[in-house]
Image: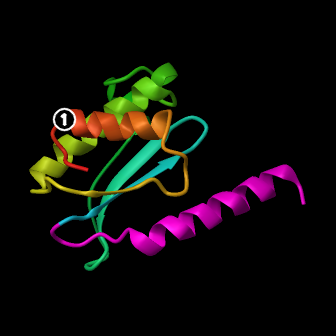
Amino acid sequence: MDKNKFLARQRQRRKTRVRKRVFGSPERPRLTVFRSLRNVYAQIVDDVAAHTLASADSLSLARAGTISAADAGNVKGAAEVGKALATLAKEAGVVRVVFDRNGYKYHGRIKALADGARAAGLEL
């Protein structure tokens, strides 16, 4: 098996393990994160209603001029995505969320996104 397939399979196993315990309710929806090589994406999901309440990503922030295109995929960009998502969540009436790291290790961009959301007033 080649290395990329192996790493994807390992992440899928971690993701399954995390999702067994993490569930988004209307009172406390799930904040889920996806990171690609160039961008970071996050959304707040109510799993009971199967509805996305708010979403933000570094690609749209870079297009809007909030962050530079060079910072879209790094820690600085992830922190800005967290702040933007927290702002949108407050507008949607969400204050507390459950953090779903989606199988990624809690460091780097994932940690920066969570810290940015906390700094903007979202309770994880």
Specify the quadrant that holds the N terminus: bottom right
The residue that disc 1 covers is 120
Residue 81's x, y, as percent? 34, 37
Q: Is residue 55 magenta?
A: no
Q: How is the image coloured?
A: rainbow
Amino acid carrying mark 1 in the image: Ala
Helix, strand or loop under label 1: loop
Residue most extreme to the bottom? 48
Label 1 packing within 10 angstroms: few (<14), some (14-19), many (20+): some
Is 19 magenta? The answer is yes
Tell whether 15 sits left or right of 11.
Answer: left
Query: Which residue sits at x=88%, y=54%?
Result: 2
Residue 38 is situated, as x and y percent measured from the top left of the image, at: 57, 34
Q: Magenta region: which residues?
A: 1-27
Quarter of the rendering containing residue 17: bottom right
Residue at the location (48% across, 43% down)? Answer: 106
Of the pair 13 and 76, the residue shown nearer to us = 13
Residue 103 at x, y percent in the picture: 55, 56
24 is higher (above) or lower (below) than 84: below
Residue at image coords 30%, 64%: 45
> Quick one: which residue is furthest to the right in this view?
1
Number of labelled discs?
1
List x then y, in percent, for residue 64.
Answer: 32, 29
Q: Is residue 81 left or right of residue 38?
A: left
Does 51 sit above or below residue 94? below
Residues 16 and 61: in front is: 16
The rendered magenta stretch, by its main secondary structure, is classed as helix
67 vs 115, nearest the viewer: 115
Q: Residue at x 46, y 69 (%)?
A: 19
Task: Classify residue 116 by image quadrant.
Answer: top left
Decide if residue 74 is on the left or right side of residue 84. Answer: right
